[in-house]
């Protein structure tokens, strides 16, 4: 059966497309058949990665999102072979429309009836967006209580802590841990070196494999390789396939 990975978070600019690209690269690196879809009506960042060959879905009708356009996504996923992995990146502006579509149309149940499995992925970040991202996580748990959720901790904007407590000590963790398939902590590195290298890599929409085979300076390639190795180790522990 195919494994469908939806990347969902209502807060913009917290790393959803980053997570989608990392997940797709990871699965490709394991030799798996990966199909990527981008439903972000504004940025379509994942679709910018040529190496990931993501399909950008047009979900707009004029100036508004047309939920019926998500039917295209469902049809495309259902027709995929049983050994496929699917990564669906979704924008902040389409978080509510896609979530509502999945609920109202019992779309996850339809996918499961066709023999597919579903995981929801969301991002929790530090800094000013921490409460907003926790709210997005809580919404997913509330609306999809039987669907496994993978939480990606992104410390790029600051430590993920409230009153000195880390994520695993938050109230939401104790209340919702049974819904979590895994918690993945993205490696946090020095901003002036690793951070700048990563920002430039993501801006180029370049994969780590492409960067490793490029003409980038040796130490830049070394830092990117180190980050990617540590990221893969984190994802390995999540058992996503």
Image: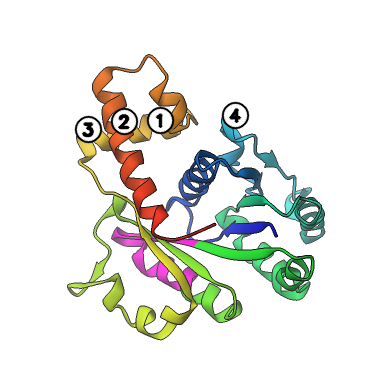
- Per the model, the C-alpha gap separating discs 2 and 1 is 6 Å
Which residue in the structure is indicated by mark 1?
201
Callouts 2 and 1 close, C-beta under 8 Å:
yes
Residue drawn 58% across the image and 64% down it: 119
- Per the model, the C-alpha gap separating discs 2 and 3 is 6 Å
For residue 20, above or below residue 197? below
Q: How far across and down, in percent of the image, does residue 2 sit? A: 68, 57
| Boundaries of the magenta span | 122-137
Q: Considering only order in the chain, which callout, 1 or 4, is on the residue closer to the N terminus?
A: 4
Task: Judge from the rendering whether residue 128 lies leftward or rightward of residue 29; answer left or right.
Answer: left
Residue 125 is one of the magenta-drawn residues: yes
Which type of secondary structure does the marked residue at label 2 adopt? helix
Which residue in the structure is indicated by mark 4?
50
Along the viewing direction, whichever of 208 and 64 lies nearer the viewer: 208
Q: Quadrant of residue 64?
A: bottom right
Callouts 2 and 4 close, C-beta under 8 Å:
no
Residue 236 is one of the magenta-drawn residues: no
Which residue in the structure is indicated by mark 3?
193
Callouts 3 and 4 close, C-beta under 8 Å:
no
- Per the model, the C-alpha gap separating discs 3 and 4 is 26 Å
Q: Main secondary structure of the magenta part?
A: helix
């Amino acid at each position: 059966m195919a494994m469908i990975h939806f990347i969902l978070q209502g807060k913009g600019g917290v790393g959803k497309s980053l997570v989608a690209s990392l997940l797709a690269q990871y699965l490709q690196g394991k030799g798996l058949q990966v199909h990527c879809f981008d439903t972000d009506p504004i940025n379509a960042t994942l679709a910018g990665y040529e190496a990931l060959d993501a399909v950008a879905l047009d979900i707009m009708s004029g100036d508004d999102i047309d939920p019926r356009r998500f039917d295209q996504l469902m049809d495309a996923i259902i027709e995929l072979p049983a050994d496929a992995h699917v990564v669906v990146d979704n924008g902040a502006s389409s978080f509510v429309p896609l979530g509502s579509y999945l609920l109202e149309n019992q779309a996850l149940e339809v996918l499961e009836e066709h023999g597919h499995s579903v995981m929801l992925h969301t991002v929790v970040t530090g800094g000013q967006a921490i409460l907003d991202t926790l709210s997005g996580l809580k919404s997913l748990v509330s609306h999809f209580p039987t669907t496994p959720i993978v939480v990606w901790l992104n410390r790029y904007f600051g430590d993920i802590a409230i009153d000195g407590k880390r994520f695993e000590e938050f109230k939401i963790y104790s209340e919702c841990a049974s819904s979590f398939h895994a918690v993945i902590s993205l490696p946090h590195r020095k901003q002036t070196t690793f951070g700048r290298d990563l920002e430039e890599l993501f801006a180029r929409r370049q994969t780590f494999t492409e960067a490793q085979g490029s003409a980038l300076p040796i130490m830049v390639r070394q830092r990117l390789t180190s980050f990617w190795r540590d990221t893969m180790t984190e994802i390995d522990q999540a058992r996503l396939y």
